[in-house]
Amino acid sequence: MPQLRKDPILSRWVIISTARNQRPSDFKQESSAPDQPELCPFCPGNERYTPPEIVAYREEGTEPNQPGWHTRVIPNRMPVLRVEGQLERRGWAMYDMITGVGAHEIIIETPKHDLDLPDLAPHQIERLLWAYRDRSLDLARDSRFRYILILRNRGVAAGSTVSHPHSQLIATPIVPKRVEEELHGARLYYEYKERCIFCDMIRQELVERKRVVAENRSYVAFEAFASRFPFETWIAPKFHSCSFPLIEEEAVTELAYCLKETLTRLKQVLGARSYNYVLHTAPLPLKHTDSYHWHIEILPKIGRVAGFEWGSGFYINPMLPEDAAETLRGFEIVTPGPSRPAEPQAGVSEASP
Amino acid sequence: MPQLRKDPILSRWVIISTARNQRPSDFKQESSAPDQPELCPFCPGNERYTPPEIVAYREEGTEPNQPGWHTRVIPNRMPVLRVEGQLERRGWAMYDMITGVGAHEIIIETPKHDLDLPDLAPHQIERLLWAYRDRSLDLARDSRFRYILILRNRGVAAGSTVSHPHSQLIATPIVPKRVEEELHGARLYYEYKERCIFCDMIRQELVERKRVVAENRSYVAFEAFASRFPFETWIAPKFHSCSFPLIEEEAVTELAYCLKETLTRLKQVLGARSYNYVLHTAPLPLKHTDSYHWHIEILPKIGRVAGFEWGSGFYINPMLPEDAAETLRGFEIVTPGPSRPAEPQAGVSEASP
């Protein structure tokens, strides 16, 4: 059973999950991942190599755990937290521990092994976002969980061990420290201003426009003012919304277009470089708050994080975010869809690989 | 001029230092560093390739910026912060910035290109620690600086671009977030208990002994209870001491032995694997505090930090710290010096490469 341990000074939780130790790549230096589609457990036809699916959006008339799916959600075969078991808090002299209960799911984004997320048709990206939402709503009913973290590792340098496009969803019995810090900072601002700090920041970005990368009626993508990495890009709803799983249908369509355009621009500039994205949303239970605002942080893997960053928690970024935004904006892209404000929605069609 | 920018939500400072952009390796994926000792700017005889030295401990009668030194401190040719200029705080609508004043120095640890720190004789490690102290005391007099961060990147994966053994010292106009968090956590504990949390933790480690790796009269090295990485090892004085630069002569000798033993054990288990270490000490101005305790955190580069860690601020460690400690303790090493409690100090002699 994995365990969570708390650093007594920083209140930083660490998952100690020795089951993953069996995966030799965890202890190896970075190397390029072998790409053998015929052995890919996420490809159609290989469904038997994964645990049975939790949910799949599939062609009518096709059977579970058989080909015919568009988007497929499975439990992670090597979960960092386990769904079975009681949530127990224990002390160990001055130290604190929690049993490692949680959920760890994989969302396979497309049957096509070689497509990357920005290559997918907008309606296929919509399916992915619906999977994020549906799984979140389902897991939110489990009272042991305090947070649902949705993330995507793309490329070996980003920690991905399977190249078939997929996202991950991890439900945790604590609120992650980074999110706790955001909640705290946003709450302080709200107490002082009675406004959401994210709403204010987005308004400023839309006025200033120097860091904006993409925009449509409901979403904006921009380089963070205090970017840790070159091309660190955030996507946020322009309207106040604290909780991603409470997203509405029209907003999903708009988000799919904004995500596609943003990742396409990043890909055009950075090529096949590895990146992570993470979706930050309010903790569980699902409820409205005026001070927090969900958003996606996209973190391209550029440069190395060295002792200075680990030791200090502050980062050295060799590029002005304004320059990164200008580079990302500096070309036309095909099929941006409804990515300009108030433009009507374009027709959708599956992209060919 | 570099600038510091503050994330308005997290109060996390980022250094935007575009001068470093000129270093192509900053944008490249990780690759093995070419090792060409004849071109190494840190080797004796190549002193003209570095900025003039700030201080050097050298053989009597040898000239500055000439061979004959044991330990040499130079300004970093590509500093992340610049020593010239006024400290100015500015707003930019809702955002905060500070001019990037600071100091960034390189401490060359030995004239010998191919030695690693644990291979050095204890008295040579002592010289390094004296350099840490002397430079800290000097920079502490500059009222623009709030913090002096001492760190060591070893190996390409740890962010090192020069393989000749060296440490870095970075003086910053703000207290780094990670240290601020430690100070805050330690202060809360002190308010509640009227005891230093580090002292309590060290006492518990010495009683429990499951995570202890090395120990002598004044220092203990142990695996952190909530280690983020396998073999994450902390070294701390057993006696209460908030500020490293106020270290006394005998304690330097003891620390040199403890550091040597700890790094030797890590090297024996992990081979030439990359690692970072960072020295956390109380902020400037130098003064006594009952609640904080300086220490060194050694972070071997094992595994990859993926979206989960970036996104959540909590880490997945595939190894129990107790198992790591047992592995590190599990063999005798040569010349541990005064590394057992109350053992008399051994004679010192320069190790051969």
Image (cartoon, coloured by chain):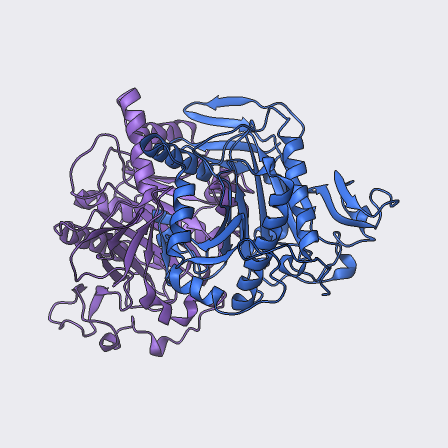
Chain colours: A purple, B blue
- Compare residues A51 and A237 and report the one nearer the observer: A51
Total count of labels = 0
Residue at left offset 25%, top offset 47% = A174
**Residue B125 to residue A1: above or below:** above
Query: Could you say where residue A173 lies in the image, as x and y percent from the top left?
Result: 22, 50
**Residue B322 to residue A269: above or below:** below
Relative to B49, A208 lies left or right: left
Q: Residue furthest right?
A: B61
- Compare residues A248 and A136 and report the one nearer the observer: A136
- Compare residues A2 and B210 and report the one nearer the observer: B210
Relative to A241, A38 lies left or right: right
Relative to A268, B208 lies left or right: left
Q: Quadrant of residue A100?
A: bottom left
Q: In the rendered image, which quarter contains the C terminus of chain B?
A: bottom right
Residue at left offset 64%, top offset 39% = B133
Using the rendered image of the protein, determine whether residue B78 is visible from the camera's viewpoint.
no
Using the rendered image of the protein, determine whether residue A298 is visible from the camera's viewpoint.
yes
Query: Could you say where residue B181 lies in the image, as x and y percent from the top left?
Result: 41, 37
Relative to B222, A112 lies left or right: left
Query: Could you say where residue B326 lies in the image, as x and y percent from the top left?
Result: 43, 65
Query: Could you say where residue A286 lies in the image, as x and y percent from the top left?
Result: 16, 42
